[in-house]
Amino acid sequence: MVFIAITAIFLAATALAGPLVTPTVHIGPLATPTAPAGPPPVPAAPSNNPAAPINTPTPGADKPAGQFTGDSTYYEPGLGACGTTNSAAELIAAIPVSMYAKEHCGQQIIIKAGGNTITVTAVDKCMGCKAGDLDLSPEAFRRLFGSLDKGRAPIQWSWGSSQGGAAAHA
């Protein structure tokens, strides 16, 4: 009996109050600003000066040409992205992930810094390096700068010959 009374009161209250309405908000895509209608942009005329940055890779080439500048750091080598396991005593480098391609594995890199020049072999990729930077083995870093004290130092480098995947040894 109590159940029937409560149900009757609920139905009466609902009838008096009207239907229960829950407000809804519709969130649609943001409006995209539109440019005023007009003629399409005209492409620039070809230049008679085909100068390009010296570190732009040549399409289809197995290595980019030119000189690169960046910072060198050193790391403790192990199993690298090229599939070889290397040691701290080898003259090796990890190249920036943005420049890395399997074709670079085993390729020689000529590095100049502080009046010294060394040749190292690309064996890994460096996830934290920006374009132009190289992460060197401790031995390569020592040969350029005399010790590991600097930790980071500027370098210039270029691609050398391809060695078919073999790491350079001192």
Image (cartoon, rainbow, N blue to C red):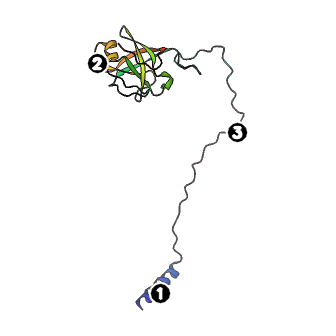
* 30 is higher (above) or lower (below) than 68: below
Q: Name the residue under label 1.
A: 8
69 sits to left or right of 44: left
Residue 52: x and y, percent? 57, 17
How much space separates mark 2 and mark 3, taking CA atoms?
61 Å
Q: What residue type is labelled 3?
A: Ala
Residue 90: x and y, percent? 35, 18
Secondary element type, mark 3: loop
In the rendering, which numbered label is found on residue 125?
none
Image quarter (top left, top right, bottom left or bottom right) of the C terminus? top left
Q: Which residue sits at x=61%, y=43%?
A: 33
Closer to the chain start, of discs 1 and 2, is 1
Image quarter (top left, top right, bottom left or bottom right) of the N terminus? bottom left
| Number of other residues with Cα within 10 Å of mark 3, as a class: few under 14, some 14 to 19, many 20 or more | few
Question: Does the stretch in magenta take in 89?
Answer: no
* 161 is higher (above) or lower (below) than 2: above
Closer to the chain start, of discs 3 and 1, is 1
Q: What residue type is labelled 2?
A: Leu
Secondary element type, mark 1: helix
In the rendering, which numbered label is found on residue 37?
3
Residue 114: x and y, percent? 35, 10
* 11 is higher (above) or lower (below) than 168: below
Q: Mark 2 points at which residue?
A: 148
Tell me if residue 19 can be seen. yes
Secondary element type, mark 2: loop
Majority secondary structure of magenta residues: loop
Closer to the chain start, of discs 2 and 3, is 3
How much space separates mark 1 and mark 2, taking CA atoms?
87 Å
95 sits to left or right of 146: right
| Number of other residues with Cα within 10 Å of mark 2, as a class: few under 14, some 14 to 19, many 20 or more | some
**Which residues fall within the magenta stretch?**
26-40
Q: Which residue sits at x=34%, y=20%?
A: 137
